[in-house]
Amino acid sequence: MKRNIHQRMIISLLPVLFLVACDKYLDLTPKGVKTLKSTTDYDQWLNNTSLANSIPNALNTLADNVDAPTIPTPATSVDDFIYTWQPQFSVDVTATPQFWAKFYADIYYYNTVLQGIDQALGTSEEKRSLKAEARLGRAFYYVYLVNLYGKPYNVNTAGEDLAVPFVTSNDVEDAVPARSTVKDIYEHIISDIESAIPSLPKNNNNNRFRGSVAAGYSILARIYLYMGNFPKAAQNAQLALDNGPNVIFDYSTLANPNTIAFNAYRPDAIYARQAISPANQAIPTLAFLRSFDIKDQRLKFFYTNLGNYTFPTRGTTRFQPSPLSYTAHANWGTSVAEMRLIVAEAAARSGDLPMALNELHQVRKCRFVPADYVRYESSVQADILNKILAERTFEFSYNGLRWFDMRRLDAEGRMLDVNRYNGQGTIIATLPQHSNKYTLQIPMQVMYYNPGWPQNPQ
């Protein structure tokens, strides 16, 4: 084991195996990497539960649909600091950097495959497939990092806006790369996925947490959406649907969520992921709860204490993805519904209103019992686009995506100021339109060891 491993991990931006649960397959420690000798070993390495339950729950805490009615004044905890968009979420240099540490830890797993698989025992085909999965997985987590620590993609400034280091090594003693630009990270993501797709498995039906051709296209669809390249986003979303699952799990005939499959086998999951604590609750804002159609099955299945649907009291109703079932956890990865809504949004923006309405219909009809469903119709482009954007908030309410939608919509002038309130209804924090707070500061635990890096303004 390398000396001073905790410090070295922070210095090298790879705060990995001690910052996440050890893999139960090999009970891995840093020197345990040497036990990866065959393609079978590397295949099991990619089944690590840390990669399946990999997205920090606190991503939801940044979003405008989350409430914290019992927050103390002044804020005291890490979650409180995240909720109020403080410049730093901890001032303890020994603390684990929020978001940063977990995503680089997951990238470490994929870099380990890319660094060692060529020397492993196994066939060339097995190695190509595992390398492709590793490139896809690495790209997936860089989508999060660049959209947390880099400005929203702007074709005119992306080549100058700083983002995060692009780490390809799994050696904690390698030199730390400089911060790449937003443009560079997006290009790395697209290149990794495009090079991976020809060698990815044709499907991941046995484990949706693993890579597939459809998964590759689905991440490309998401990244092009965040770039504002809507034709490319729609093209790749359709390729994901054409090459993988293409049926939305239909809630319209269910009495409760007990029959919703675990994400590894869920038929409408394309590239499944879960939160680090997938059963954790979230507290919705009253405004968000009141924006639902009360006949929406998502409200019935995934929210508790609905009362008479007037939602008079903050904190009473909770989002709990598996109130009845221990398997119906929210999918934080990509899904058929996400691809449909990307196609719908792109169509609405381009003026193809019939396609936009049809794709929206494909999602919404699965979220109401037939007697309660009314197909949305309009001939007004702006209204259709707003309806699709609203549908994204219902479908992806607490799976970490809302913050990224807020960023891209704010860049278009579509976001209003967002306020946070204490238990007495007093405003304690505001996220203004076009605020620098939409780009997180580099954690001070990382800056401590990289003092020459420019810090993101707040």
Image (tube, rainbow, N blue to C red):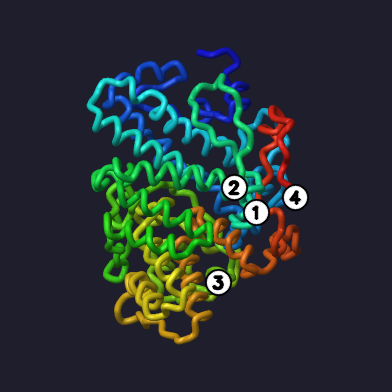
- What label does residue 182 carry, if any? 2
Q: Position of residue 413 (x, y in %)?
A: 65, 69
Give the residue at x 71% y 35%: 453
Q: Amino acid at mark 3?
A: Phe
Mark drawn on residue 73: none
Task: Identify the disc placed on residue 157.
Answer: 1
Q: Earlier in the sequence, mark 1 or mark 4?
A: 1
Label 2 near label 1: C-beta < 8 Å?
yes
First along the sequence among labels 3 and 1: 1
First reached walking from the N terminus: tag 1 or tag 2: 1
- Label 2: few (<14), some (14–19) or many (≥20) C-alpha neighbours in 10 Å: many
Please tell me whether residue 347 is drawn above or below residue 223 in the rendered image.
below
User: Which residue was labeled with disc 4?
Assistant: 458
- The residue pinned by badge 3 equals 311
Q: Is residue 308 visible?
A: no
Q: CA distance from mark 1 to mark 2?
A: 9 Å
Q: Which of pointers 3 and 1 indicates the residue nearer the eye?
A: 1
Q: Secondary structure at mark 4?
A: loop
Asked if the residue under mark 4 is in contact with the one under mark 1, i.e. CB atoms within 8 Å, the reply is: no
